[in-house]
């Protein structure tokens, strides 16, 4: 929901509340839409257990997301609030940045209510309910990650005062959406953009193409990213506790000032001082560039 477009400045669309929320209207989902959720869920649930952080699988279980059909946000929020105080609210699509951060800072996760069409099963540009709910919500049942998401929302509101949103957006992208975590001596998935994508769930861990680099907050905030294809670099955190600690203990105001003069890094860059797990061959990105 980041990088809101200019037309969002006109205010909420018809039918939306002042905070851009809308009813999920769960009863309006068709059998075909429920079947699409079930197909996507079955595919991901079958291949993720040995690849994703155990906290994600625990979240799927305690939130009962294996129940057939698109989840009812009201039922889901009731279970989630008992665990970490978060809820899930429906929005019509992209929302303005301040609205996005305000919801996060108050432990409300905004989710699209539409689900992809059969021809979009492997890729769609705007996040749908499967990406938002299957990808993001299980980790909101983890107390530490839930605190990180709230802290990010609060930091996002502050970033608007510094004109530094594009820098902070990179932190969200490389952690919440496309992060890896090192647990029990090997890498696991946790970013929602990966775990909701069959292809990237394999690519991010197994393919020799991308870099896999130890997480460093300033390094991440200097690094550009790809919005329409697999990532060229994945950043690896040591734990959710360490990610939360670095976020809470960093004074972002001087960091933003420092980043104003620091050059941006390309998505495939490796820097001196990087903690490198994999120096990627970048064959996938080169092949796509040739086709383009």
Image: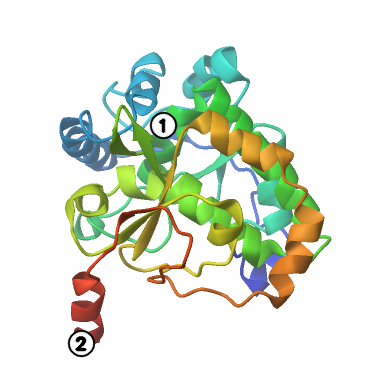
Local packing at callout 1 (Cα closer than 10 Å; few below 14, some 14-19, many 20+) is few
- Tell me the SS state at disc 1: helix
In percent of the image, x 42 and y 70: which residue is there?
A: 267
Relative height, residue 157 to residue 238 (above, below): below
Q: Nearer the viewer, residue 90 or 190?
A: 190
Position of 152 with respect to 64 (left or right) is: right
Position of 121 with respect to 115 (left or right) is: left
Kindly indicate the quadrant of the structure image that contains residue 279: bottom left
Local packing at callout 2 (Cα closer than 10 Å; few below 14, some 14-19, many 20+) is few
Of the two numbered discs 2 and 1 in the rendering, the one whose residue sits closer to the viewer: 2
Locate the C terminus by quadrant. bottom left
- Which comes sooner in the sequence, label 2 or label 1? 1
Q: Position of residue 168 (x, y in %)?
A: 64, 58
Whether residue 108 can be seen here: no
- Tell me the SS state at disc 2: helix
Disc number at residue 290? 2
Q: Return the residue at label 1.
A: 27
């Amino acid at each position: 929901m980041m990088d809101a477009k200019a037309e969002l400045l006109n205010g909420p669309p018809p039918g939306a509340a002042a905070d851009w929320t809308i009813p999920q209207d769960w009863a309006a989902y068709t059998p075909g839409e429920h079947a699409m959720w079930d197909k996507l869920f079955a595919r991901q649930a079958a291949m993720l257990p040995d690849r994703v952080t155990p906290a994600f699988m625990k979240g799927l279980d305690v939130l009962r997301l294996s129940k057939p059909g698109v989840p009812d946000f009201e039922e889901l929020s009731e279970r989630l609030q008992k665990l970490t105080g978060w809820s899930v609210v429906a929005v019509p699509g992209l929302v303005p940045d301040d609205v996005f951060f305000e919801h996060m800072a108050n432990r409300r996760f905004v989710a699209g209510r539409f689900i992809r069409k059969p021809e979009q099963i492997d890729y769609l540009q705007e996040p749908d309910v499967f990406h938002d709910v299957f990808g993001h919500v299980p980790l909101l049942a983890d107390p530490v990650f839930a605190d990180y998401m709230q802290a990010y929302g609060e930091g996002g509101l502050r970033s608007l005062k510094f004109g530094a949103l594009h820098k902070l957006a990179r932190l969200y992208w490389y952690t919440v959406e496309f992060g890896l975590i090192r647990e029990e001596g090997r890498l696991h998935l946790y970013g929602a953009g990966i775990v909701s994508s069959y292809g990237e769930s394999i690519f991010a861990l197994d393919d020799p193409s991308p870099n896999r680099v130890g997480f460093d907050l300033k390094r991440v905030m200097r690094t550009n990213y790809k919005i329409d294809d697999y990532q060229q670099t994945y950043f690896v955190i040591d734990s959710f506790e360490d990610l939360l600690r670095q976020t809470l203990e960093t004074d972002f105001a001087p960091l933003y000032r420092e980043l104003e003069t620091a050059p941006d890094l390309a998505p495939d860059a490796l820097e001196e001082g990087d903690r490198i797990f994999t120096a990627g061959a970048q064959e996938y990105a080169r092949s796509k560039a040739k086709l383009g």
